[in-house]
């Protein structure tokens, strides 16, 4: 398949999530990184020279030589139209820039796989996790009027991803109705420089702007159904409390759940253990063998020890036990910059290829 | 009052909580430290020579010279009877040792103010926070049969203390019925050496043995009432999830509450702000001016920044807001080794003095 | 003395060091905080409203009400002349701003006690630690031509302070000739937001811009002599390597020293233990009882456990032992934002008052 | 080669370094894990049931089923002789146990590749890093008298490894004569539970028992020469200061060096960059492509970002610059539990196979 790789670009390539995209795409079996976009001040220079690499390892040598292109000409107020030799554009843009730039790319015919929150709540834009709601891709048909052949697909907030993975099989089997979620989120979720060490060393910051609302809203969308081509939110009441903790990578969510039909702990464990995505998804190159791992030790999952399971693509769940107030308590851990960000968006793009939304 | 100080001893004086007792009692206006007890292997040596001081500062110079006494002869299986020139004994013993040793001291006529969990759930033993349930002291009358003039009073688990402080005024005003609590607990709560750095650096450990049960049970006891000399547990359903986090001191509790009469956020804030203990308590030497501080910033309280409020004796509460599932969400921070341990027990002893249970 | 307090101002009052100045000056026996200056965007608003308080505790209530004044009109390019009802100005300005603003204040007749590096190396400006080189104050006479009655006095880099305290008595007794210094510096030394948590959590950053040069240069100045009114640098060769570590407060310096006359470990310990400042300094309100504490445990001093000694004003030294290469090895710990910054500058101002350079 | 794998055992298989051995050997191309030994209380149980897995990932599934054997019968005081179906024994034993047990295995004809310090300083036992002193293997001939066909080979202290890698090419080219080394060592170097979180969170502990002596002594041995079958220590004066820091993995060494012939920075960089091991070593399965990586950024290497280079087998060096006191300053980072422990010992065993000291 080497000679038929699909050319792709990364928007916001120099930030923390952008670097993850670059790292993952540099050796991807289906995609070939052809263009790197960033803000005006990096434009024209080699990627390796303008990007202060902050994730583990070094920038891929070949990619380091690519000259960075400015995305500034593609703000909505301008008249420039993107013209890049690529078919798919991965976006790691800040949300306010994404709101300007992503529609320009969609309108110019590109498929935009975005990690930004700008269009997550648009009724015509899929908020997508392949193993959870692959059928939501159909929403892109509703973008034809606006964008023609291009369209936008989004991946959810990193914490929502860690919450919704255990919810999905439990919802299918027992009907999730109420969710309490308290999160303990890694600093990498805030990007670089992001959280000041003076604020977080040996401390907890019990507030992340907008996070609780995102978790509550996105969970309802991800568990929603497509009816007559429209997305219907799931009927779940969610209460989220978000905290920043001195952990590098890996978001932890403590949750308590009530169901339509209360399962026993054993029934819940069986549903979690039996969770398997559809075959079309299992064969995607970035799909983990098991997207949901059930830990049985009393003190797992833990962010540092479980975030890297299945190359950071598996969510781990554990401590499944009854709850004095609702039905069940448990907790999950997700790698927030892999499954919860760059790898998640790449898996979305792979699904689009497998479903024929992107031509090989 | 210098010449009428009450002589006291510390059991388990070399451990982390024991060191806090020693530090606080070395300059106490009412109490005078006369004896330090620890395990056999320290016996006979000077406190400064056997105690590896791990809390801030240095051991008080005068106390360092006191020779340590073994508490081993006072295990229940032995026949030795404690005979120390003190009236009050503060216990920082591990729970299994406390179960053996504390009754021997009570039976020998001493007042035991214990920080151990061994007798917290005994129906005749007060589980006491002066500002919350000072009237529970009356339970000591029920110990007369067993112990004669001596008795045991306990202070609650450190995390429970942080939870119950905001609950108390809200319960008085609106009737707390349901409590969700997710905790993020400091490593000092596990003593020294306690939590291995290999387990907790950059990590969360989502399990603390027995902690969730303690929080659930002790909260019901602390909010309970004394009826006809007996303690009746409060009718509150509590669901706790306990986590260890890489924070040195200060336990954080995220909570969500349902009430008999749902208050508005403003009404809840007013109740929290208006909380004042009885005058007899306000005048105790270790009592904070305000035992409950309401923070109004969006990102407070934080353990590192708020644990030391009022010399570590005030609990801070903040982010009081409505909850999509129950009525209100909020969080609290408590200094776990001061208010939640040594200082709490000392305040209990002060209350006993003020109420005449301990003679001056 | 209440009614004769000397009115003072703080430049750069909203930053991390500025907050320390405000905290310390709010209850100072000699000084009264009358004016707070910060950048243009804070001007006119109440201090409590514009200052995001990041150090422990809360802003002093009375100070919180003071309206902030902009220091922008006092850049050298402007013609405004400072006119504040104060005699002493404490500067916590960034160095580039200090270079512009501090001379304007000196020229307008104020005494500037600066924590910035801008004028530390000026031959006419004392780089001052009272216990180390109080006689260097005489250099201010050389500023008369430039500034008239006003003048600038600086305090050294925070790490240099931790290094030079043990050097001083050893230099007096044995003549320090060579110094190896490897530092492990707390994140608070970089201010707020300063060091990104993504860079320092569970990591070491072996580089701090300009730091090694400052340490090498300032140590020679502090150990220098005043000859005929001029400062002669000490003849010491210094090699410094600076590292940032995940510690909140407290800089640690591992050092190895060669002397003109090699002392035994015992002689060195005696010199360190015997170090006492002149009586005039011992009576200053911020002076510690003992500015240099010698620890004898094998594993002390440690930044978290020793930084707060004597209200953060004492430097701790320990592990004094022979060196296979030079003469002696040892290490020291200093509280970088107290002794090494705000408290140090306040002590300088107190010395100026005691010496009559500032009128009461 | 599958069917000719060499059967091996791990001594001390349940500890932190033992787990690394197990993880690495489970998929080794030359070695096949056949036996796991640990203390008496684990004996007879399945490895997965007795080993609390603390390193990333999970125990290899097949290995988990192996029943653990007690090493207690092989203490020197006993008469049991080891009889295991293996040829090579990797030792992760504590030093005091290693001193008893390792000679018993050597005497019984096994090749012992030890990570313990017990026999590192024995003149007949190679202290070995293949890229540094492969010719020291010859010392095993001197063990024939004692042990017959079996023998012991040791790997150095983890910190020494990080120090000696940059020293080796510089010594070859310019003759290292003096070394200052200040270390900042990760907590994993102390094993599990090892360092208490109460001691190291937000702190530095400036002392590691015996570490400085090991670094000084082992460096002289590793840089020594074999003359007439005997090891002659290198003529280098070394002064080490060891610190524990809140870093999970990765030891950092700040060093300053003096040479027989002072190189320029460029000459030193060239020597470091040109360092290549002999071809026989480059072809060993665990050998990194480049054992020494030179970083040119001003703030690298860093333990968290550079420890994993080349699967944790490359040492990184950077900040090569002149020194005001000696000739050059620089720093290095090594992964202490991979290159500095388990992987290092495995590479030693591979060298023994390649050199014919172990039969395939």
Image (tube, coloured by chain):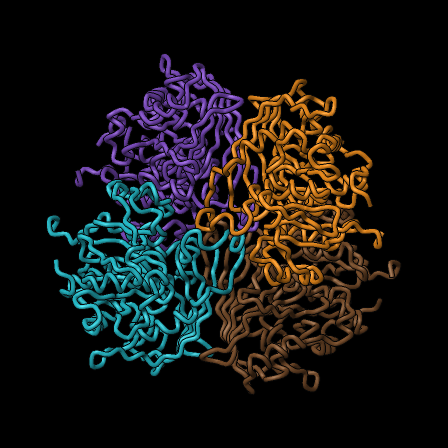
Chain colours: A purple, B orange, C brown, D cyan
Provide residue B165's location: percent of width, then percent of height. Answer: 67, 34
Say above or below: B288 vs D332.
above
Q: Is residue B133 left or right of residue A330?
A: right
In the rendered image, which quarter contains the N terminus of chain A?
Answer: top left
Say above or below: A246 vs D79.
above
- Toward the right, the furthest residue is C3
C227 or B25, nearer to the observer: B25
Say above or below: D341 vs B132.
below
Is residue C49 at least partly visible in the picture? Answer: no
Provide residue A132's location: percent of width, then percent of height. Answer: 35, 25
Residue displayed at 52% across by 52% down: D201
D335 or B234, nearer to the observer: B234
Q: Is residue D228 left or right of residue C313?
A: left
In the rendered image, which quarter contains the C terminus of chain A?
Answer: top left
Q: Is residue A303 left or right of residue D80?
A: right
- Toward the top, the furthest residue is A228
A328 or B47, nearer to the observer: B47
Provide residue B96's location: percent of width, then percent of height. Answer: 55, 42
Say above or below: B150 vs C297.
above
* Numbered marks: total: 0
Provide residue D31's location: percent of width, then percent of height. Answer: 19, 53
The quarter of the displayed image where residue A312 is located: top left
Is residue B242 at least partly visible in the picture? Answer: yes
């Amino acid at each position: 398949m080497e000679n038929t790789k699909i050319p792709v670009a990364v928007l916001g390539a120099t930030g923390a999530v952008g670097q993850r995209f670059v790292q993952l795409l540099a050796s991807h079996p289906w995609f070939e990184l052809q263009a790197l976009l960033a803000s005006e001040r990096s434009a024209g220079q080699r990627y390796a020279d303008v990007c202060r690499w902050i994730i583990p390892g070094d920038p891929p040598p070949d990619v380091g030589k690519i000259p960075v292109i400015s995305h500034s000409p593609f703000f909505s107020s301008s008249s420039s139209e993107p013209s890049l030799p690529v078919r798919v554009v991965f976006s790691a843009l800040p949300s306010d820039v994404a709101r300007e730039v992503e529609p320009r790319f969609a309108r110019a015919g590109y498929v935009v796989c975005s990690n930004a929150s700008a269009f997550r709540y648009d009724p015509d834009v899929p908020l997508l996790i392949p193993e959870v709601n692959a059928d939501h891709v159909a929403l892109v048909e509703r973008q034809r009027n606006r964008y023609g052949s291009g369209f936008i697909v989004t991946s959810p907030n990193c914490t929502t991803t860690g919450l919704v993975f255990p919810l999905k099989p439990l919802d299918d089997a027992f009907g999730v109705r109420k969710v309490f979620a308290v999160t303990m989120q890694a600093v990498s979720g805030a990007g670089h420089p992001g959280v000041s060490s003076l604020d977080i060393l040996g401390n907890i910051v019990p507030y992340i702007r907008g996070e609780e609302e995102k978790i509550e809203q996105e969970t309802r969308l991800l568990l929603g159904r497509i009816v007559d081509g429209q997305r219907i939110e799931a009927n779940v009441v969610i209460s989220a409390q978000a905290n920043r903790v001195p952990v590098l990578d890996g978001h932890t969510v403590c949750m308590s759940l009530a169901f339509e039909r209360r399962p026993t702990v054993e029934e819940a464990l069986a549903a979690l253990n039996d969770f398997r995505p559809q075959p079309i998804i299992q064969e995607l190159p970035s799909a983990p063998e098991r997207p949901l791992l059930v830990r049985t030790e009393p003190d797992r999952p833990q962010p540092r020890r479980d975030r890297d399971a299945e190359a950071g693509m598996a969510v781990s769940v554990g401590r499944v036990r009854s709850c004095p107030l609702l039905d069940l308590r448990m907790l999950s851990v997700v790698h927030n910059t892999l499954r919860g960000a760059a790898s998640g968006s790449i898996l979305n793009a792979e699904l689009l290829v497998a479903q024929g939304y992107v031509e090989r």
